[in-house]
Each structure stands twice: as C-alpha cells, then as structure tokens.
Amino acid sequence: MKASIRYGRSAALVLAFLLSLMMMMPPNMAYAATKYTATGSETAAQLTAIIDGTTTDAAGNKYDVVEFPAGTYNYNMTAPIHIRRAVTIKADAGANVTLTGGDFRGYANSNTTFTGAGSFLLKNPNTYGIWSNNPSVKFNFDHTNFTIDGAPGFGFYALLGGNTTNIKGGTFVVKNCANTGNEGGIEVDGATFNVSDGAQMTIENNGNGTFGDLYMNGKMNVSGANTKVTINETRATARGYGMVIPTSGHLNIDGATFEINTTTAGRGLNAGNNAADTVNIENGGKLLIKANGGLANSGIRRAKVTVNDTSVLSVEGYKYALDGSVLVTKGKPHVTLNGTTEDNGSTPVFTGGTNGSIIMGGSVLEDYSNHVVDGALTATAGGSQVATQPVNTAGEALTRFDIRGLSNKTINIAADPDNTAHPAYTYSVGANHGGTAYVWAPAVNVKFWETKEAFDNNDAAKLIKTLTTIRGNNLKLVGATLPEAPAAPAGKVFSHWVNADTGEVFDVNTSLSKSVTNVYPVYKVPTVKKVVKVHKKSPKTGDTENIPFYAGILAGTIIALGATLKLKRRA
C-alpha cells in the first residue's frame, strides 16, 4: 500500500517536472519543420515517397516542405501521389517542374499547398490532375503558376462533397482535358472554391459538353479587382455548355472579372434552378458571356442572376441572352442583354416557362415591346423583346426610359397615390450605355387636349398628344417637349397649358404622380398698348415773331448799364 503511494507520488513529480520543462521551452523548439530540397536526380517513385511522407529525414520526420530551386525538373510519374497530411510543395523563381503521368490525390484532412514564383505542369496525368474524395481536403495554390494539361478525365475533380480550394495570385490553367466521355475540365461537388488576390485562372478546350469546362456544384467565390477567371469553350458541341451550376451550386463575383466565351456550345452558363441565388455579382464585379459561334441557344439558362452596386453583366451572341432565368438589379449596375431572338425569354418545355427581370436600379439594356424616347412611347424595333415585362420588388410593371446624357444620378420615384402597395423608392444610375441610360421605372402619362370641351367629352379625335415620364418626376427629365397648342380662336392668343384637375399652370417642370394628368390650352385676348406721340417744337432761324420782345430787353440792359457808369463817375 505504502509502496504504491510512493510510486504514485514519484510519477506525479516526474510528470510535473516534464510539464514545467515544456512550458519553459520556446514554441519553436517544440517541433522544427523539415524541408527536402530537390535535385532533379530523384526517381518518380522517390519523389512520390518524399511528398506523401513515406520517406522521412534522418530523425524520422516527414518532410513538411519539398522545395525545387531554380532549374528544370522532369519526372515521368507512374502512379498517383496520395496525400494524407499537410505538405507544402514549392517551386522557387526560375524553377519549372513537369510531372508527366500520375496525379495528386487528397484524402480526409489533408492540406496540400503549391507555392513559389516558379511553375508546375501536370502533363497527361494518368486519370485526373487533382483529385479528392472528402470535403475536409484542402488544396492551396499560393501565388504560383500551376497548369494541368491533357488529363483523360477531369483536370480537377473534387467529388463526394467537394473540397476547399484556394487559388491566390499567380496563374491556374486547366486545358485539353477529358478528350473522351462526358467529363470536363473541372468538377466540384460541394464545399468551396476560392479564387482571389489577382489570380488569373483559365479553363479551356476541355470535355465534350455534358459537364462543361467548369462544373460547379459547390460555392465558387471569385474576388479582387485584378482577379480574373476565363472559360474558353471550343469543343462542347451543340448540346454542351461552357459552365454548369447545378441546383446546389453558386457563383459569387466580388469585384473580379468572370468571362465565358463559347465557340461550339449551345449554352454559355447552364444552371439547375432560377429560384435560388445562382449568380451574385457585387462591388464592381463583371460577368461577361459571349458566343463566338456554334448553336448558341442560351447565354444564361435557368438561373437567378443578381447584379449589385456598380457591377456589370453582359450577355451577347445567343438566341436567348437569358433563357428561363430571372434577373435582379440593385444599386446602379450596367446590364446588357443582347439576344438575337429574345433578350430574356423562355422555352417552357425545357425551362418551365419562368423568366423575368426585377429591376431596382442601373442602366439595363434589354428590349420590351415598347420604350420611351423623349417622352414618347415608341414601339421597339427588331425581334429581341423580352416576353415578360420587367417589374420592381413591389411587382409594378416597369417601362424603359431611354434618357440621353444621364449618368451617376439618382431618381426619386414617388409612391403610387392610387395604391399603397407601391411605395416610393430611389433608383440610381451609374455608367450609361454610350451616352444613353436605360432606366426602368413606373410610368405616368400626360394627355394634351385641344380644348376643355374635348377633355370633358373625352373626344379622342381631339387628343393632341400623350407624353410619358417617370412617376414623381417631370417631362424635362426624360427629354420631352410640350406640343404646340392648336390655333387660337379669333381675337385671342395662346397663354399656357392648364391642369384640368387643379387649374394650375402646367409646363415641362411640373412633377407628376397621378397615372394620368389631363391638360388643355388656355387662350387670352392680346393686350393692345396705346402709343402716344410727343411733338417737340424747335426754334426756326428765320422766325421774326419775337424780335420786338428781344429788342426791348436789349434796350433796357443798355440804359441800366449807362446809369451805373454815371454813378461811378460822380462818386
């Protein structure tokens, strides 16, 4: 009993000593990271063992960092590199590392980082370039240059919940992959895929269509003003896509640029659900989708696209710019939908017939059956009109106003006096389209009648003109000018237009909130000014009428002067 107590006390003292010693040790003494510096003489099998941790240093530690100094490295890989740990693979400036065959496979809780100013090339991998099967996997590409070229399957394949991928700075290229079958360039089945810090990501010439160059069933975030993702589709065929976003997928573009260019595909961006927020563009981000050839049926199909702030959306070259999709604008974005058949339509058999636009700001160029130019409602030429009239968040039907010279302005839209469900709101415009802002807002009309009697009798034959403006604003805002009044009755002249309801004077500066305002001309008798002529009489040189008068004055003056002189002499 006593011996066991003594043993317990001794063990406790030893444990306490060890704990205190560990607390006194500097943190960097607890574990020193190990690095392997490549020489290029390693065999493929040796390099694989070093990276996956099978080969250790002399102390039995796995190498945390595998570094390639400046130089050229070529390895003919015969098997995948299986990674189940944290490891950093670095290519220094001037280092060009080529791995032909093989691939990198990440498993649960692994964390692989490729870094350095040099370059990595995975050429003709055996199956996939990068592969993972667990959402806890992480792949990081930190300010390096990484290319996957010629994988028979996906170049990058994150299945079973996807993984977390971070591409920061540098370049990341996936090309010429999935030459057979229906796979594509990149497939992500969950988790997150982040591109940031000025990274330049290019995905091109991959797949045969079904999965597109990029299949994103996870959350893709592209951020940073200098960051850019470019998809160049060249062989998806008519039934293929440039990018696919299934029901659970999402694309967020935050200040960055995202381009999709198709050459053979039938669709630029093909999504699975237009009820959820499929694509969000914010903080000046840009989504540019363009068809350069091929069937080019749908630019964005079955998606909900929200364009915020000063962001840009441009879709051109497709029959349907938006097909079965919903557009939402907020802030003052710049949107261009240029469909050859319809700007925002739907083929009900394929997309359920749901489509439309909810516009709360920005210059939005999409065609409806009519639009307002200089205050006049004008039929839209061509055949690309949207099938569903755009609305605001209150569900009000909107009219497009083409306003020249308007940019970086705010328009206050008044509440609907006839419907409390239509409140006041502010509409902002940033950059316009080549000098013209395309503003979507609730419209109000002004009817100009020949006479008060014509208005009272609702005599359509005597309706001179109808002009349209934005509710709560005047005609001047939309560039309208008032019509000329009819010829005045005999003995009268035109005075002004008058509001039939209020009796107040009406002109282009009058604000309008009612759905219809009626005005008619008022005439007056012209004022006649009397002209009074004043005749002035000027003296005539030969006039003798006043000679006696002037002679008398002269004589008197002479006599007075003579008398004055005599008085002076006597004195």
Image (cartoon, rainbow, N blue to C red):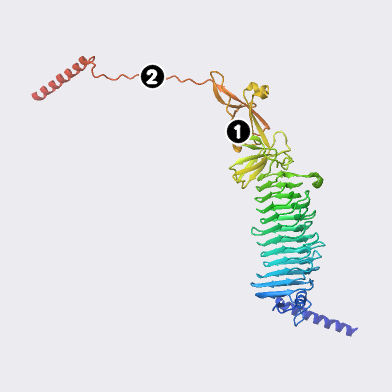
Q: Which residue is drawn at 62% across and 46% down?
A: 433
Count of all numbered marks drawn on residues in the image: 2
216 or 306: nearer the viewer:
216
In the rendered image, residue 535, in percent from the top left (x then y), is placed at 35, 19
**Does the image show residue 496?**
yes
Circle 2 residue: 533
541 or 461: nearer the viewer:
461
State which quadrant residue 181 falls in: bottom right
Q: Report the amino acid beneath label 1.
A: Thr
Please rate how many residues cluster around mark 1, counting C-alpha atoms within 10 Å: few if below 14, some from 14 to 19, many from 20.
some
Q: Is residue 453 above or below residue 215?
A: above
* Relative side of 304 to 518, left or right: right
330 or 169: nearer the viewer:
169
In the rendered image, residue 475, in percent from the top left (x then y), is placed at 61, 35
Q: Earlier in the sequence, mark 1 or mark 2?
A: 1
Outermost right residue: 1
In the rendered image, residue 180, in percent from the top left (x then y), is placed at 79, 62
Mark 1–mark 2 distance (CA, rounded to whole Å): 44 Å
Secondary structure at numbered mark 2: loop
Outermost left residue: 570
